[in-house]
Image (cartoon, rainbow, N blue to C red):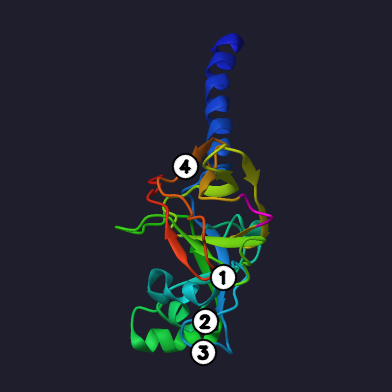
Amino acid sequence: MAPSLRFLLLLPATFFFMQTLAEAATCSDCFIQSQAAYYPNSDEYGTDTGRCGYGSFGATLNGGDVAAVSALYRDGVGCGSSGNTDFILSRRAFSRMGQTTDAAASLLALGVVDIEYRRVSCSYPYKNITIKIDQNSNYPYYLAFVIWHQQGRRDITAVQLCETQNFACKLLDRSYGAVWTTTSPPSGPLSLRMLFSDENGDETWVVPVNNIPQDWKAGETYDTGVQVNS
């Protein structure tokens, strides 16, 4: 075979190999090797003081089969999603990795196990994205809230509050976890804008149908009237 022909045949094969490596390195559906443990001093459903800011509500997510993470936390952006880190589960979630009662007891006795995982879409059938006003909020001087029931695989990377009368908007701070905060919040009914970002860098602003009422109160929940599906 002529050298030039061998080169022409080798070039596509090399390109295909490099393309395969690149796809493998960025594969969002690939399994990642990690480890999992559980809270040894917690009750069956974990604790009320997680770093994502969900409080006792976190124990109700997915029927109590929940986990906390370290690097996945990503200053709160990763609350509820996946990445390279170890998982700290509730006793209930940890034991449910065993297919039988005896297997569950064996897992609890081990304390730490090797796992493989990948990020999947969250699903909250018949639920819209919901705003829970944090107990530390102080109307009308300080507003903090968490965002519940976010479907799909995208991250909320920015949140704005806008006055519904003059449409002046204020970018909120992420104080910790999934808690968004602002001092001197806008007055009147408030329109929320959430920036959703995917793993490819694409960004989309989502505007809820329902507004946060003018007389919002600490501890209250407000249905946004919208849901994301990707």
Q: Earlier in the sequence, mark 3 or mark 1?
A: 1
Label drawn at residue 68: 1
In magenta, the rendered stretch is 182-186
User: Left or right: where does residue 31 sit relative to residue 83?
Assistant: left
Q: Earlier in the sequence, mark 1 or mark 4?
A: 1
Distance between the alpha carbons at the discs numbered 2 and 4: 33 Å
Residue 120 forms part of the magenta stretch: no
Specify few, some or many for label 2: CA neighbours under 10 Å numbering under 14, 14-19, or 20 or more: many
User: Left or right: where does residue 61 sit relative to residue 15?
Assistant: left
Q: Which residue is mark 3?
A: 109
- Residue type at mark 4? Val
30 over 37 or under it: above or below: above
Residue 78, image x, y percentages = 58, 57
- The prevailing secondary structure element of the residues shown in magenta is loop
Label drawn at residue 97: none
- Residue type at mark 3? Ala
- Residue type at mark 2? Gly
Residue 21, image x, y percentages = 57, 38
Q: Which residue is mark 4?
A: 207
Residue 36, image x, y percentages = 55, 73
Q: Which of the 4 image quadrants contains residue 86?
A: bottom right
Q: Which of the 4 image quadrants contains residue 133?
A: bottom right
Q: Secondary structure at mark 3?
A: helix
